[in-house]
Amino acid sequence: MYPRLLPVLLLGTLISVATVSFATGGDSLDKAQLATLKSATTYILAITGKDTGATGSGFLARKSGKTGYIVTNHHVVRPGGKLANLFVVFDSGTPKQERLGAKLVAEDVARDLAVLSVEFDKLPEPLAIDFASEPAETQNLFVLGFPFGESMSASAKHPAVTISRAGVSSLRRDDQGRLVTVQLDGALNPGNSGGPVIAANGKVVGVSVASILGAQIGLAIPALEVDDLLSGRPLGIAVTGTVSKAGNAKVDCVVTFADPLTRITGATLLAIPMDKAAVLPQVGADGSYVRLAQGMKEYPLRVIDGKATAAMVVKAEDGQAKVGYYVQVRTTTAGRPQRYFEWTKVVIDFAAGAKTEVAVGFGQARHKDESKEAKGDGEAAKDAPAKDTPAKDSPAKEPPTKDAPGTEPPAKKPDATE
């Protein structure tokens, strides 16, 4: 996959399209669509210290009463991997600008996604997420966000949203045919990471995440990944195996989940020996994963505070030293059909004192930053802004690190972008 071949620049709030070769004509957004998109696209500040942090983009994806849920990139809310005090700005750069303290309620490191929550009695309408269809090559798209952060502000307020054109140049899939990356034609700049990528019908088809250094190529996370996170999904699995004198292995599995809207009502761990699932299936017509194989043994999972456990008993046959299993998770979500997720390999070693091995967990990192220049941050928020009124509500749900004592963004404007 491309992270192994090309240096990828994660762009905290990512995307201003400088040149577009085939997305300059045809579709456009009407005034009503523009108003909806602009009001739901948010400017994000992640403050890690008195004069340090990053900025990025996001968008309102769901709301429940006064609680709003904002989707963005994981690397935006964890600049340089650090804990941060988080702020979300609605109507940035306008007279209606409102900056709110935000809580981190879900993070998916492998897919570089995060969900923040805010409390606000004037939430706009959330953006519709088109998870049921895929964009097509040469399709015209619109990218919303805040390129170059505070340096683009023309007033005492935070910057106004930028809307740029892009075109779909390629669809990148994994070995099972799942769409994992939408490749965009155009140069992407720091400041738009986490911002919505929009089709002509006004629906979200992706989330800006990165660009390829030295090329006019941008990358976006498909909408199906966003829907999976909002609906609740497994993130990883930790496995320990204990071998008895009788040659059996008790395998304890701890599955972690992200469920920001508390939608999961049930979950099951499925397992099958690898030699009984020699042919791995492709995804379904809607791009979602399917049951790995018939004959899988099922272990109920009870999800509590984002974790669930299951125990398997495995016996080596014919003097086997190791036994390999595929494990998969199925969830039941309120108002939705049962869903299956990607599988991983578990290898049980029957030697005394040996450790059980897990291949990858659920989801391999897809947007690894390999450039020396990029640090995984968004637009640098050194001397980051707090230009209008003090932030409302609470900051990040986690306490700041020792080098990030403040909860208010500093008052100075950044000198320059990184």
Image: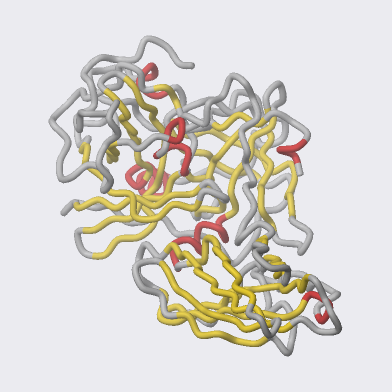
Comparing 271 with 372, the one in front is: 271
Rendered position, 237 above or below 373? below
Q: Residue furthest top?
A: 415
Rendered position, 54 above or below 99? above
Comparing 412 with 325, the one in front is: 325
Residue in view at x 17 percent, y 36 percent = 391
Judge left or right: residue 190 versus residue 58: right
What colour scheme was applied to this rendering of the protein?
secondary structure
Comparing 136 with 113, the one in front is: 113
Judge left or right: residue 109 versus residue 416: right
Judge left or right: residue 165 versus residue 295: left
Q: Position of residue 75 (x, y in %)?
A: 48, 38
Q: Residue furthest front?
A: 245
Is residue 287 visible in the rendered structure shown here?
no
Q: Quadrant of residue 54?
A: top left
Q: Quadrant of residue 333?
A: bottom left
Judge left or right: residue 67 versus residue 162: left
Residue in view at x 45 percent, y 35 percent = 81
* Total tally of numbered discs in the picture: 0
Rendered position, 18 above or below 234? above
Q: Position of residue 338 (x, y in %)?
A: 54, 81
Residue in view at x 79 percent, y 59 percent = 175
Q: Position of residue 305 (x, y in %)?
A: 34, 68
Which quadrant of the rendered structure holds the N terminus? top right
Q: Position of residue 216 (x, y in %)?
A: 69, 27
Q: Residue furthest bottom?
A: 295
Residue in view at x 49 percent, y 49 percent = 113
Comparing 81 with 232, the one in front is: 81
Is residue 42 visible in the rendered structure shown here?
yes
